[in-house]
Image: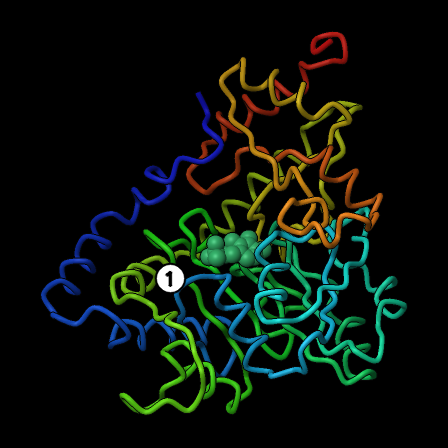
Amino acid sequence: MIPFLDLKRVNEPHSVAIEEAIKRVLQSGWYILGQEVEAFEQQFAAYCQTRHCIGVANGLDALTLVLKAWDFPAGSEVIVAANAYIASVQSITLAGLTPVFVEPDPQTYLLDPAKLEVAITSCTRAILPVHLYGRCCDMEPINTLAKQYNLNVLEDAAQAHGALYQKKQAGSLGDAAAWSFYPSKNLGALGDAGAITTNDDTLADKLRALRNYGSKQKYVNDYLGHNSRLDEIQAAILSVKLPWLDDENKRRRALAQQYLSRICNPDVMLPPSDQLDQDAWHLFVIRHPRRDALRTFLRERGIGTDVHYPIPPHRQQAYETFAHLSFPIAEQLHKEVVSLPLNPTLTDGEIAYVIDTINLMSERAIA
Ligand SMILES: *Cc1c(COP(=O)(O)O)cnc(C)c1O
């Protein structure tokens, strides 16, 4: 049996150090926004090569707080790929802004710079490139357009811990970046956690207030903020795991390489491999015209899969206002994508079994 993701097994190599970290926090008597959070913020900013890291409660808040901090006029437009994760889109509407969807690049599934310029209007204020599945968006043309039209760039790096773009770290590629440390991410806590990285001193200062009721000084409120503080326990656990992130990503890359070189099934479309060593391989996503039949075939042979994601944001019931929109590339992706097991604790034997099972499957076998 190979489950899609076994988090107990993923955390097992760190368990002794995690238990020590938890005990240290327990005995400190200080549980929210303290030394552990500050230490992790410094370590993560250094890792991302940014001046600041601001710990927050989760990835959705990280996105939303940045968009709120920028204080755009209500209804301003933010450009995002039509196949983005729902949190990326929800952050825009939660901040009182309007998402403008563009079709993803059909090869990389990422924001397509070639389709960006026509989406820009006089109301556009920001671009939200999502580094979906662990691969960085093509930031150079995105940043060039942003500069030309005076737009802010917010990276959604929640799937891209340790990913690189032109040798630079994800999280240092725009005006600010939002991170999630949800347990299943490449750098995952044992609960909810998130962060923002940025080189902008003024923005960082404001975000530190916004995460804590808009207050810089206790009981003095400069802004209307949120309660989006980071727990000491989660920060301490993240500090245990961060030093291992690059090694774990290296293992992900080796496993992705095995999938890429040995999956041989004419119906399967593999993910792009041209940035194998820069991609963080959060997910290994293949496409198949009969995705659900493939999932059943694998499940019957003990292999768990998942779908990221089955329904595009503009087709969600929560977004009835976008129901009239049509994005054929995104809609087809949502019908065909399936994520194979990929995490640093999988053995070569387990990956080989997944590969053999996919190669075994023919149209007849799943008819
Ligand atoms: C996980 C994720 C988020 C949201 O993170 P939470 O911590 O669950 O709020 C945002 N964007 C992307 C791309 C994600 O994968």
Q: Residue at x 50, y 51 (%)?
A: 249
* Rendered image coloring scheme: rainbow
| Helix, strand or loop at mark 1 | helix
* Quadrant where the image shows the C terminus: top right
| Residue assigned mark 1 | 243
Q: Is residue 142 left or right of residue 257?
A: right
Q: Residue at x 82, y 82 (%)?
A: 149
Q: Is residue 160 visible?
A: no
Instruction: Tell which residue pokes out farthest to the left in this image.
Output: 27
Towards the viewer: 136 or 89: 89
Number of labels in the image equals 1
Q: Is residue 303 left or right of residue 323?
A: left
Towards the viewer: 294 or 102: 102
121 vs 22: above or below:
below
Task: Identify residue type, mark 1.
Answer: Pro
Q: Residue at x 47, y 52 (%)?
A: 186
* Quadrant where the image shows the N terminus: top left
